[in-house]
Image (spheres, rainbow, N blue to C red):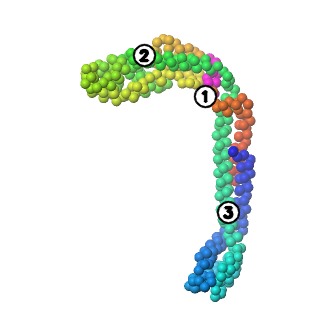
Amino acid sequence: MTERAEDLAGELAAAHEAYEDVDERIAEHGESDLGGLADAHDRATTLLETYEDRATGTGDFEAFIRFQESFAELVESLDEEMPLRQAFEDANDRFDKRRLSSSDFAAAREALAPVAERVELLDEREQRREHYREVRRRVVARRDDLADDIAELERLSTLADIDLDAPVGDLREMVEGYNEAVAKAFQRFRGEASAREVIEFVERTEQYPLVPFRPPPDDLRKYVETSPVGTEPLTQLLDYADYSPSKLAHYVDEPDRLRKNVAVHRSYLDGLDATALEIDWPPPSAPECRFLLRELVAVVGRFAPEEVVRRLHELRGFARSERYERLHRAAMAREELSERDRKRLAEGTVEADLTAARNDRERLAEALSAHPGP
């Protein structure tokens, strides 16, 4: 469940206040004095825990003596001005006898209780510090999530005036009709033209950056330019590459050279299709589409029948119309929008949600600024 910005901001303020409260109480006692008191208390409680079982009753007399001496030395080592020093002396008085019992240790702990209570301020501050940091982390995470939400809502806002019911099928029919036609034309070109012509065609498309054919490998290009088999169709060269060495020797003069320059590039040649000549769906915006179509007309006209080029001219003319841009935007929106996005647009809640998200993010940013990390 998403946490409300208002609740998070309030929780951060409360966590900061709680942390500062205990920090002020520590400052009242003195950070250094409290640290020294905590060290002395730790040493005292360690002695109590270590020797209670061994130094009580008629147990280990040596441990009994060692404990009495160690605890007395601890108390004597404390600064005369140490806060609550008397508590340590009171605890030590409980051990000034010939035999100790568990009740003496309990009484010593009770005498040290005021010390324990005071030094607990240090642990309490650490706990409150960690809680404060954890709340800040949640506030930062929510603020960042809101930034993502705002970006998404801003994107939706730009699509609010788009007619999602526009008949994009008209545009799609033109694009897909061309793509099918150019794919067939290129397949025919690839199967009927010489390998030399196909490779030369691909090489020349480097002049057209919007028609992204992969350039042919240099050794393949040189081979089809210089070898007699370069005048045969590309599909035939690929068939040759599958022949056994003995069979291939009957068809080409230099079998090893064909295998070296054609067979090794089978993946490139198998992938040489009309993809670079096709138009994506959704198609580009009107200005981009016009640039693309100008290059496609120049390239496709080198091998395809007039009917394919005519489709490009028709689409190019359509890209100059206002209707194209309207259908293009509708097509883009249909591809981008989820069902939830469409529902939000239909309900007209995008602007209200955007305003609320911006307000929440501002509230959290202000809270983080007002309550810096400890």
Q: Residues within 10 Å of mark 3 (few under 14, many from 20)?
A: many
Residue displayed at 37% across by 20% down:
235
What is the distance, in whole Å, between disc 3 and disc 2 at their CAs?
Answer: 80 Å
> Residues at badges 2 and 1 in contact (C-beta under 8 Å)?
no
Percent from the top left, x then y, of residue 371?
70, 53
What is the distance, in whole Å, between disc 2 and disc 1 at their CAs?
Answer: 33 Å
Percent from the top left, x then y, of residue 284?
57, 24
Residues 66 and 52: in front is: 52
Q: Main secondary structure of the magenta part?
A: helix
Per the rendering, the mark at residue 188 is: 2
Q: Amino acid at mark 1?
A: Glu
Observer-side mark, 3 or 1, equals 1
Q: Which residue is mark 3?
A: 125
Q: Which residue is mark 1?
A: 335
Observer-side mark, 3 or 2, equals 2
> On the rendered structure, is 17 left or right of 189?
right
Q: Is residue 260 above or below residue 133?
A: above
Local secondary structure at mark 2: helix
Q: Which residues are magenta?
A: 320-333
Q: Quadrant of the N terminus?
A: top right
Percent from the top left, x then y, of residue 354?
71, 37
Q: Quadrant of the C terminus?
A: bottom right
